[in-house]
Image: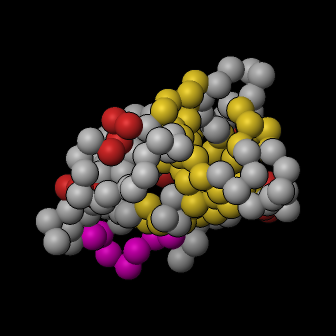
Amino acid sequence: MILSDRKIKELLKKGELIIEPLDEVQIQPSSVDLRLGNDFLLYPEEIDILDVKNPDLGNQLKKVVADDEGFVIQPKHFILATTREYIKLPDYLTAFVEGRSSLGRLGLFIENAGWVDAGFEGNITLEFYNANSRPLKIYPGMRICQLVFAQMESPAEKPYRGKYQGQRGTTASRIYMDKD
C-alpha cells in the first residue's frame, strides 16, 4: 500500500518515520520531495578500470562541494550526489526513489538503485547521468527527487542493517564488501 500525505504526516508526528530536515511543503499527496545536498563525487578520467574488488576505489573519487552558484553535470557524465535529508525507515516501511519528471525532461537520469529497504537509515546517495548533449546546472537545496513509501504486510524479518547504514553525505560504492 502506497502511503498518502495524511499517513506520512502521522508517522512523522509519531517519530516512526524520520526525515530531517523537513519542511511541510515537501510533503506531496503520495510522496515526499527530497532536496539536493552540497557534495558530489566524480570518477576522475585517470581511473582506467573500476575494479569492484578494489576497496580503495572510493578514495580515488574526486569530491566537489557546491555552493549557491550550483554544480554543472557535463553531457554523458555520471556523478554521485546526496540528499540533504537524513531518513530513518521503520522495519515495516520501504521506499522508492523517483526522479522528478521536470528534471528528466532535461535529460537528467536520477537513481539510487531505485529502492530503499525497510530499516534503512542515512542520507540517500543518488546516481546522476546527464543524457543530454548540453551541460546541466543544478543547485544545492533544490527539490531533486521524491520518496514514495509503501507499507509492508508485516515488519521485515531481517531489516536493512547493511554496509550503507547510517551513511552521511555522498557515499561511494562499497561493493567490495559483498560476501558473494
Measuring 64% from the left and 62% from the top, which residue is drawn there?
Answer: 98
Q: Nearer the viewer, residue 176 or 2?
A: 176
Residues in magenta, as a range: 149-156
Q: Nearer the viewer, residue 107 or 17?
A: 107
- In the rendering, at what x and y percent does residue 96 appear? 54, 65
> Taking 56 as reference, is 41 left or right?
right
| Position above or below: 102 against 45 | below
- In the rendering, at what x and y percent does residue 35 appear? 65, 40
Number of marks drawn: 0
Q: How is the image coloured?
A: secondary structure
Q: Name the quarter where the C terminus is drawn.
A: bottom left
- In the rendering, at what x and y percent does residue 3 appear? 58, 66
Q: Quadrant of residue 167?
A: top left
The secondary structure making up most of the magenta span is loop
> Taking 83 as reference, is 108 left or right?
right
- In the rendering, at what x and y percent does residue 176 appear? 23, 56
Residue 117 magenta: no
| Position above or below: 67 against 116 | above
| Position above or below: 42 against 152 | above
Measuring 23% from the left and 58% from the top, which residue is drawn there?
Answer: 53
Q: Nearer the viewer, residue 72 or 27?
A: 72
> Taking 165 as reference, is 26 left or right?
right
Measuring 58% from the left and 60% from the top, which residue is drawn there?
Answer: 111
Q: Nearer the viewer, residue 144 or 92?
A: 144
Measuring 85% from the left and 62% from the top, which residue is drawn there?
Answer: 105
Q: Is residue 92 visible?
A: yes
Q: Is residue 88 visible?
A: no
